[in-house]
Amino acid sequence: MGSPYRGRPSMRDAPLSGLEIWLAGTSAELDSAVRALTAAGRFAWQGPRRPMTGPDAGRARMYVRLSVTPTRRTNRPARPDTDEGATVLPFPDRRQHAG
C-alpha cells in the first residue's frame, strides 16, 4: 500500500531551499503565474492544484518552490520614447483639483 504523502517533501529530504510560494486563483491565473515564474527560475517542486470551496469556489490553490539565482540589476531599463503599443490610462490632472 502506498504512502498518502508520496511525491510530497519529507522531513528526511535535504533541507528545503529556494523561494516558497502559495498561489491561489482561477485555473487561467495559475497557468499565467506558473509561466511567469518559469521565466524567473527553475521549479524545485510543484504541488497539485487543490480546489477551494465556499466563497472561493471556482478557484484553486497550489504550493510551489522555485530555485532562483539572485542577480543584481546594474542599469535600469530605458523608458521608451513613445507610448506606441501601450495603454494610456486617463488619470485626471491633480493640479486642476488643488485648492
Image (spheres, rainbow, N blue to C red):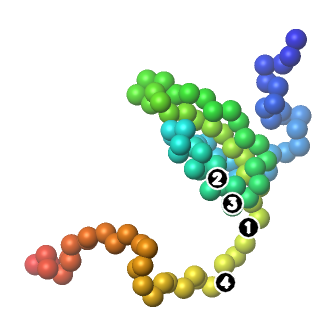
Q: Which of label 3 and label 1 is nearer to you?
A: 3
Residue that mark 4 sits on:
74
Q: Secondary structure at mark 1?
A: loop
Who is closer to the viewer here, 96 or 87?
A: 87
Cα gap from disc 3 to disc 2, whole angstroms: 7 Å
Cα gap from disc 4 to disc 2, whole angstroms: 25 Å
Q: Count the marks.
A: 4
Q: Residues within 10 Å of mark 2 (few under 14, many from 20)?
A: few
Q: Secondary structure at mark 4?
A: loop
The disc, 3 or 1, on the residue closer to the chain's N-terminal end is 3
Going by the numbered disc 2, the residue's amino acid type is Arg
The disc, 4 or 2, on the residue closer to the chain's N-terminal end is 2
Residue that mark 1 sits on:
70
Residue that mark 2 sits on:
35
Tell me if label 1 and label 4 are in contact, CB under 8 Å: no
Which residue appears farthest toward the left when viewing the image? 99
Going by the numbered disc 3, the residue's amino acid type is Ala
Tell me if label 3 and label 2 are in contact, CB under 8 Å: yes
Cα gap from disc 3 to disc 4, whole angstroms: 20 Å
Q: Secondary structure at mark 3?
A: helix
Image quarter hosting the N terminus = top right
Q: Is residue 56 toward the left or the right of residue 16 in the image? A: left
Cα gap from disc 3 to disc 1, whole angstroms: 13 Å
Q: Secondary structure at mark 2?
A: helix
Q: Percent x, y for residue 94?
A: 20, 76
Residue that mark 3 sits on:
39
Q: Residues within 10 Å of mark 3 (few under 14, many from 20)?
A: few
Rendered residue at 53%/43% (across/down): 28
The disc, 3 or 4, on the residue closer to the chain's N-terminal end is 3
